[in-house]
Amino acid sequence: MEWFFAPWAFMAYLGGPHGYEPPAPVDRWLIEIVYETAAAETRCTRCGAPLEHPRLRAGAWPVRVTARCRGAARHRHRADVSRAADGLHTNPLVRA
């Protein structure tokens, strides 16, 4: 009998089709502005080269932000942005 409720509990845990809400355009715009500013002022922790413009993967929460350094090795940096009741929670760009 407990197998009957397992799919419903699993879908509720993942957000499922009922609770799924992709990032709004204004959220994506705000995230882009924040991380473009952060990338412009951040240098690669490995080689010291400046970072390129960040790219967003914003199909669902959490939004993934990636940026590569302009050095020869092109080190990758990334951050996750999550949504909470009190607003957006941004993480710093760190080397992946």
Image (cartoon, helix red, strand yellow):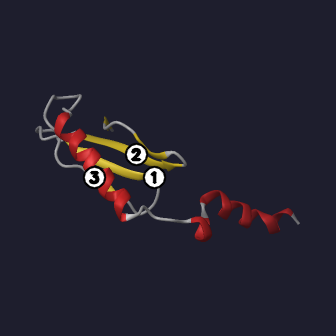
Q: Amino acid at mark 1?
A: Pro
Check disc 1: other Cα within 10 Å, few if <14, some if 14-19, many if 20+.
Answer: some
In front: label 3 or label 2: 3
Is the residue 27 above or below the residue 52 in the image? below
Mark 3 highlights which residue?
Answer: 32
How many angstroms separate mark 3 from mark 2 (CA)?
12 Å
In front: label 1 or label 3: 3
Mark 1: secondary structure: loop
Tell me which label, 3 or 2, sits earlier in the chain. 3
Horizontal and vertical percent for residue 20?
55, 66
Mark 1 highlights which residue?
Answer: 62
* Lateral position of residue 24 relative to residue 72, left or right: right
Q: Amino acid at mark 2?
A: Asp
Mark 3: secondary structure: helix
Residue at the spot 61% in from the left edge and 59% down from the top edge? 14
Q: Amino acid at mark 3?
A: Glu
Horizontal and vertical percent for residue 38?
24, 39
Please identify the quadrant where the N terminus is shown: bottom right
Mark 2 highlights which residue?
Answer: 80
Check disc 3: other Cα within 10 Å, few if <14, some if 14-19, many if 20+.
Answer: some
Mark 2: secondary structure: strand
Residue at the spot 26% in from the left edge and 54% down from the top edge? 55
Tell me which label, 1 or 3, sits earlier in the chain. 3
